[in-house]
Amino acid sequence: MLSKKLEEALNNQIRIEAESSQVYLSMASWAEVKGLEGVAGFMYGHSDEERMHMLKLVKFVNERGGHAKVSVLKAPKTDFGSLPKMFQELYEHELFVSKSINELVHVTLQEKDYATHNFLQWYVAEQIEEEALARTILDKINLIGNDKGGLYLFDRDVQQISVES
Ligand code: OFO
């Protein structure tokens, strides 16, 4: 059985994962209208993964005797300026998510809930991968700069890069 405090903290994470999904969906749509099909595909996929992260938490909370809440989400922005700016934002967003997962893990220790602690290790590992992936993409994008040919190839290849879910 989850403590009230942990149930609340998990529900907070459910909202964060749902908001992440919305942020990446908005990035996908922005890239798509700019004609960047590869980047759009990558972001649509990433958005789906975040939804999966959210669902995994929903099922866990309910299974442990809590109640997973579906809440109002913050609307993401609709214009991301440029590719480097967008990928910078993605990277920063993942750092924010990692921080929030770490805080959640901290609560499991305070509450001495080792089952939830164990469950969250999947998210801890996932964040290592997601941060590494975001950093790799950001480095590539910064290397390409304004080179049109480079951008074309990046857009073509980015879909092959994906995070394991
Ligand atoms: Fe990309 O963050 Fe979920 O966990």
Image (cartoon, helix red, strand yellow):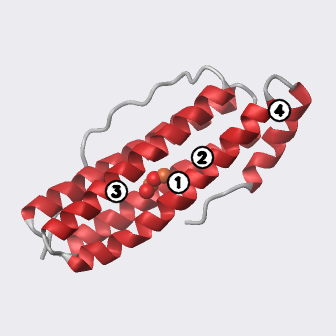
Q: Quadrant of residue 37?
A: top right
To which residue does mark 3 refer? 101
At x 49%, y 38%, the residue is 92
Numbered mark located on residue 132 in the image: none
**Mark 2 burial class by Cα count in 10 Å: few <14, some 14-19, many 20+:** many
Answer whether labels 4 and 3 touch (C-beta < 8 Å).
no
Q: Nearer the viewer, mark 2 or mark 3?
A: 3
Image quadrant for the C terminus? bottom right
Q: Amino acid at mark 4?
A: Leu
To which residue does mark 1 refer? 48
Q: Amino acid at mark 3?
A: Ile
Q: Amino acid at mark 1?
A: Asp
To which residue does mark 2 refer? 44
Q: Residue 74 vs residue 146: left or right?
A: left
Q: Quadrant of residue 79?
A: top right
Answer whether labels 1 and 2 touch (C-beta < 8 Å).
yes
Answer whether labels 4 and 2 touch (C-beta < 8 Å).
no
- The secondary structure type at the circle numbered 2 is helix
**Mark 3 burial class by Cα count in 10 Å: few <14, some 14-19, many 20+:** many
- Residue 95 image position (x, y, % from top left): 45, 45
Answer whether labels 1 and 4 touch (C-beta < 8 Å).
no
Q: Residue 163 vs residue 60: left or right?
A: right
**Mark 4 burial class by Cα count in 10 Å: few <14, some 14-19, many 20+:** some
- The secondary structure type at the circle numbered 1 is helix
Q: Residue 133 vs residue 165: left or right?
A: right
Name of the residue lying farthest toward the right = 149
To which residue does mark 4 refer? 151
Q: Is residue 25 visible?
A: no
